[in-house]
Structures are given as structure tokens and as C-alpha cells.
Image (cartoon, rainbow, N blue to C red):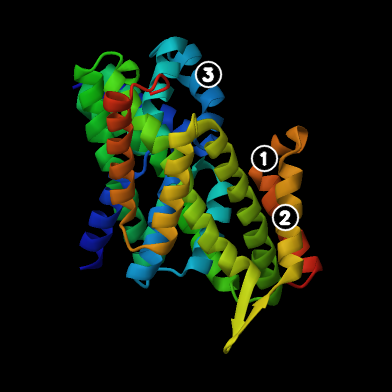
Amino acid sequence: MNVKKLGELYVSFFKIGGLTFGGGLAMLPMLQREVVTDRKWCTEEEILDMYAIGQCTPGIIAVNTATYVGYKQAGFIGGVSATLGVVSPSIVIICLVASILQNFIHTPTVVHALAGIRVVVCALMMNTVFTMAKKGIADKLGGALFVGGFILACFTPVPTAMIIVLAGIIGVCAKKFGGRKNA
Amino acid sequence: MIYLTLAIEFFKIGLFSIGGGMATLPFLMDLTTKYDWYTASELANMVAISESTPGPVGINMATYAGYNAAGVPGAIVATLSLTAPALIIIVIIAKFLENFSENPTVKAVFYGIRPTVAALIGYAVWELLKIALISTVGETVHIDYTSVFICLGAFLLLQVKQLNKLHPLVWIAAGAVIGIVFQM
């Protein structure tokens, strides 16, 4: 086993995890520099393909990409090594922030600030939903799935995972029996 | 055994959250009713902190949730469990499937799932909105109009292209200032 390679994978993805805010697409420039330009582990095209796969497989896109690059370089252990690298900074930073915040959570200034932040986070998230809906809804069935999914999640006890599985089945059925060109 | 429960719950989240970090949000919201690890209002803080610290948002939120549930070991268990399904699935795809994202069946599945994921995040946001904008004192429900106004204002500003490009951190910092100024 190539221990040096495993170390390199861990360090590279530790840098990528620790130096990007937001994950997903925000990670792309850092990933390109580290993995494509500096280390030459894969090509630009492979990274973009990986993003396409990352968006249609379960899991966090950053982790999916790390696993893929690591696996291509050093097999399963390489995938594990790169994945551990990309999540390590989060574990350290979040645990630190959480433990510090605990001491100040009842200070009036912090209480007011957090209340303001909650409202802005709502607006940011509304915008995320709006953008995702615009991109994800291709036709009337898409619209119906959006409305149906929202109603099921808000007003019925149907488990969230079940709603996702149902949506996948409906997508396949629509394509098999409805002959939809967008599917 | 809280670590086992954490491991099972976050493995499940890793398996079913498709389309990036925010797709974990509806599942994290579900956990607030199942366990006493954190409240829905704490979840809003977790989202804000996860967006304004380095690292993938999905990983940050899982780490935070695990930390709230069972300290540093909880954070590690939650995060590793979240990544486990992806690790297995991606290795299988890398090994056996060429052009996975071009496969017609895969495309059909995602044609159905994409709008639904948006709807599920919408549900989580709906729950967050209820906490941020409405307060109940005893029996009376009180709508906080200042918060409604700020929330709508921020949403409208986000539709301006130049402002939309600003990092979430800038918005969150602005939220903190507004909260302190208006004594929210």
C-alpha cells in the first residue's frame, strides 16, 4: 500500500475542506487548483463529470468527489483517506465554534444577533428553494411533484425518505409510460 | 446507546439526501421531533454557523447536530456515518458504471427527485419560518412584523443578481447586526 499517496490525498482534501466555504459548487475552484493543476490526479473533464454524478447520487457532493478522486488514485483506502481529509476541518472547526458559543448563548447581544441571523437564514433558504425549484421543475409533472412533496412533508406523517423514493418511482413511471421527452 | 442511534440516523440521512448539503435539512428537521438532541430553533443557528464556517455545509451541519447530541464523539460518529453510504456508492459507481449520469433510468429517477428535493427543503424552511416569525405567548399567536418585513426584504434583495453573488457570510453578518440594532 502506498502510504505516501494516502497521506497526500488526506492533506490535499484537508486543504480543500478547510479553505472553502459552502461546499458543493463553491468548492470547484479550489478542487481544480489542488487536484487538477497541482497534483494532476485527474482532468478538468473528470471533475465536471464527477460533479454531475455527485448531484445524482446520495450524499454530500464534496464527499462524493473526494471519494471518487481518492478511489481512482489508490483504491478503496484512497477513497477513505480523501474523504476523512475533506471532513476533518469541519469536525475541528464546528466543535470549537459550538463549544465557544455554548458559553455565550444566553448573553443578550448574542440572543439578539442570533434572532436576526435566523430571519436572514430563512430568506437565504427561501432563495435556495426558489432557485432549486426553478432549475428542477421541467414541466407540469415536475410542478405537481413539488406541490405534492411539500404538502406530504408539511401536513402528513409520511417519512421524508419515503417521499424521495416515491418521487424517483414516479419519475421512472412517467418516462416508461408517459413518453416524456424531458425525462 | 446514543452513538448507535446517531450512527443509524445519520447513515440514513447520508443514504437519502440527494443533491447536496442542504438536502440533509429536512431530515435534520425530522430529528427535532424524534429526539431531544436540539430544537428547531437551535437548528436555525446550526444552519447559520455551518454556512459561515469553512467546509461543506452538509458536513458542518451533521457535525454540529452530532456535537449537540453527544459532544465531540457524537460529532465524529454523526459525520462519519453521514459519509459512509456515499463512500460505498461512489466506489461502486467508479468501479462498474461508465457514464452513470447519462443512463436513461438514472435520468428518469432524477427527473422525479429534483423537484421533490426542492419541496422537502421548502418544508424545512417552512418550519424555520414559523420559529423565526411567529411567537406564541400562552394561547395567543403573535406575528413579529419586524421579522416578516426583514425576511421579505432580504429575499427580494437576494433576487438582485449582484447581491445574490455575495457570500452567505455577508448576509448572516448583516442579520446579526440587524438583530442587535432592532433588539430582536
Q: CA distance from mark 1 to mark 3?
A: 21 Å
Quarter of the view holding residue B177: bottom right
Q: Residues within 10 Å of mark 2 (few under 14, many from 20)?
A: some
Horizontal and vertical percent for residue A24?
49, 33
Label 3 Cα neighbours within 10 Å, binned few <14 / some 14-19 / many ≥20: some
Residue B152, label in figure: 2
Which residue is at 27% across, 34% downward?
B87
The image shows residue B103, relative to residue B75, as above or below, that is above
Q: Secondary structure at mark 1?
A: loop
- Where, quadrant-wise, is the C terminus of chain B in this rendering? bottom right
- Residue in the image at 28% along x and 50% along y: A162
Badge 1 crowding class, 10 Å Cα cut-off, few under 14, some 14 to 19, many 20 or more, is some
Give whichever of A116, B72 is nearer the camera. A116
Q: Which residue is mark 3?
A: A33
What distance separates the C-alpha of mark 2 from that of mark 3?
38 Å
Question: Left or right of A96: which side holds B142?
Answer: right
- Residue at which label 1 appears: B167
